[in-house]
Amino acid sequence: MNVEYEAMRLLNSASQLPSLVVFDLDYTLWPYFCETRSKRESPVLYPQAKGIIEALKSKGVPMAIASRSPTADIAQTFLSKLNLTSAFPVMEIYSSWSHKTDHFQRIHHKTGIPYKEMLFFDDEDRNIQAITQMGVTCVHVNNGVNIGALNRGLQKFAGIDYVGPEGQAFRQKRVTDFFIKGGKKKAKQDQLECQEESFFAE
């Protein structure tokens, strides 16, 4: 299977795309705890992770990292070796007892993107539960991020509860604070006096 092609097909057919996709690192993008590795090693990703990242990048969907790894230096070195640093303009990598709520608060502060417009992939239930409470659409992964997880995430984000036997989608109504202007999504600034410069490069 051409993972990038299949991921792009799912993105193109999605009724609504997230404004930001956030990934955990350990056992989500790669199959190990990076603190148990050395910077000298050659890192590897889960088999379908790279294709999904490339498809999101090609589609213009911004991405970020939220990791509780205590060795940010190793994580960043691995991302650099994998040529993925530029794919993640926002990277929150540090040890925390907050189950990543502080990570997402920082991501929200840096990007201005509402929590309900984010999609998050992680392998730990405690993180999924905590971040779901913030309004983020979360997907638990068992064997790393893959096409199945991406499909579940896109359906969940669009409010699709399930797909019927004839392919019909049953969904809940989703409210969004975004509007289209000039071909790009911009957030409504309800409480800010002025529009901050977008964190993401044009």
Image (cartoon, rainbow, N blue to C red):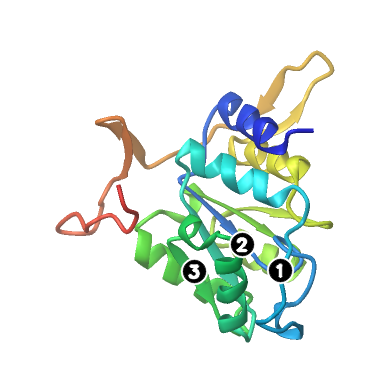
Q: Nearer the viewer, mark 3 or mark 1?
A: 1
Residue occupied by mark 2: 82
Distance from disc 3 to disc 1, alpha carbons, whole Å, reads 18 Å
Question: Could you say whether the residue bearing mark 1 is in a helix, strand or loop?
Answer: loop
The crowding category of the residue bearing disc 2, from other C-alpha atoms within 10 Å (few below 14, some 14 to 19, many at least 20), is some
Distance from disc 3 to disc 2, alpha carbons, whole Å, reads 15 Å
Identify the image quadrant of the N terminus.
top right
Distance from disc 1 to disc 2, alpha carbons, whole Å, reads 7 Å
Q: Quadrant of residue 192?
A: bottom left
Q: Amino acid at mark 1?
A: Pro
Q: Quadrant of residue 193?
A: bottom left
The crowding category of the residue bearing disc 1, from other C-alpha atoms within 10 Å (few below 14, some 14 to 19, many at least 20), is some
Task: Determine which of the numbered discs, if any, sits on residue 88 in the image.
Answer: none
Q: Amino acid at mark 3?
A: Met
Q: Nearer the viewer, mark 3 or mark 2?
A: 2
Q: Residue at x 37, y 42 (%)?
A: 177
Is residue 96 visible in this depiction of the protein?
no
Q: Residue 62's spot in the image, x, y percent?
A: 46, 49
Sequence order check: which comes first, mark 3 or mark 1?
1
Is residue 179 visible in this depiction of the protein?
yes
Q: Residue 190's spot in the image, x, y percent?
A: 26, 52
Q: Nearer the viewer, residue 146 or 105?
A: 146
Question: Could you say whether the residue bearing mark 3 is in a helix, strand or loop?
Answer: strand
Q: Residue 195's spot in the image, x, y percent?
A: 19, 54
Task: Determine which of the numbered discs, if any, sits on residue 43 in the image.
Answer: 1
